[in-house]
Image (cartoon, helix red, strand yellow):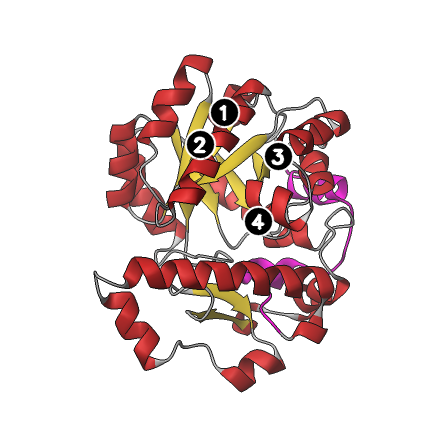
Amino acid sequence: MTEFSRSLGIQTSVVCGAMYPCSNPELVAAASEAGAIGIIQPLSLSYVHGYDFREGLQYIRSLTDKPVGVNFILEASSKRYVERTRQWLEIALEEGIQFFVTALGNPRWVVDRAKSSDVIIYHDVTEKKWAEKALDAGVDGFMCVNNRAGGHAGQLSAEKLLEDISTLGKPLICAGGMSTADDYQAMLKLGYSGIQMGTRFIASEECTAHDDYKQAILRSNEKDIVLTDKISGVPVSIIRTPYIEKIGTRANALSRWLLRSNRTKHWMRTFYTLQSIWKLKKAAMQGMSYRDYFQAGKSVAGIHEIISVKEIIEQIISTET
């Protein structure tokens, strides 16, 4: 056990990361039930899988009595989304969730609201300057998103992130590029308090993503993971499919200019977000006929079979002492 697993009361220091659109309730619950901790992604729970947020939380709690977490994206370009996030947080507190993972914004208001309920809060970071801001806001630890992650990857290696952020004196979780027991042990030996996996859990029996998505993961290796800015306006790691080869990975010149301008970048990010929510949902849930985007990290290199979440976690911790 590590400081992270002890603080949450879980058996092993593995996080099933929040994924849009792949964090279905059964996947989240299975990760927690197997001794890790599953993280609920509210937009995925409600928009993709069709649950009222409170009812979705209650359904997950009916599948496991082990700790689960909730992910809050704090990007503030939409007033409506901010209001919805605040509602989700209140419901999570009322339902007794004790672990929050925040991202893409200042977590201070989350900390101020949740600390009285003894909630443990970790913040996604890709470099030290963001970690310092989150530390000032009062978070308990950091999800260090490296350059091997799926989705919105960082630019730094796991080793460099650890070197930079460990000086802040908080527990660090390595997020990105891990799918094997050797990966897990290597990160613990470096000094991380645990790991977060996403791509590995997509290729599981409990994940309801389309089989096309899972098979694309099994077929891929590291060189098949490319970055595109066509989804959200910032680089996102995806699998290079024939469709991606055809359309390319770079936004057009006008879009890039609008994303750089202080007057238009928030509008453009909102536009990209709304567009990507639809595209990613269609691709993940309905397969290659939609010829869209399959998010994945470089951990695909170690993923060779679709097995249960329990088996995944047993394999990951098989050398744990």
Q: Which residues are magenta?
A: 292-319
Q: Earlier in the sequence, mark 2 or mark 4?
A: 4
Separation (CA) of disc 1 from disc 2? 6 Å
Residue contact at pointers 1 and 2, CB within 8 angstroms: yes
- Which amino acid is tagged 2? Arg
Separation (CA) of disc 4 from disc 3? 16 Å
SS at circle 4: loop
For residue 53, the mark is 3
The percent position of residue 67, horizontal first and vertical second, equals: 62, 24
View extreme (bottom): residue: 246
Residue 300 in which image quadrant: bottom right
Dot 1 surroundings within 10 Å: few (below 14), some, or many (20 or more)? some
SS at circle 2: helix
Q: Nearer the viewer, mark 2 or mark 4?
A: 2
Q: Eyeballing the image, is 149 above or below 222?
A: above
Q: Which residue is mark 1?
A: 90
Q: Earlier in the sequence, mark 3 or mark 2?
A: 3
Q: Earlier in the sequence, mark 4 or mark 3?
A: 4
Separation (CA) of disc 2 from disc 4? 20 Å
The percent position of residue 116, horizontal first and vertical second, equals: 41, 13
In this rendering, would 205 be left or right of 98? right
- Which amino acid is tagged 4? Met
- Which amino acid is tagged 3? Phe
**151 in the magenta segment:** no
Q: Which residue is mark 4?
A: 19
Q: Is residue 192 visible?
A: no
Q: Which residue is mark 2?
A: 86
> For this rendering, which residue is in front, 182 or 174?
174
Residue contact at pointers 3 and 2, CB within 8 angstroms: no
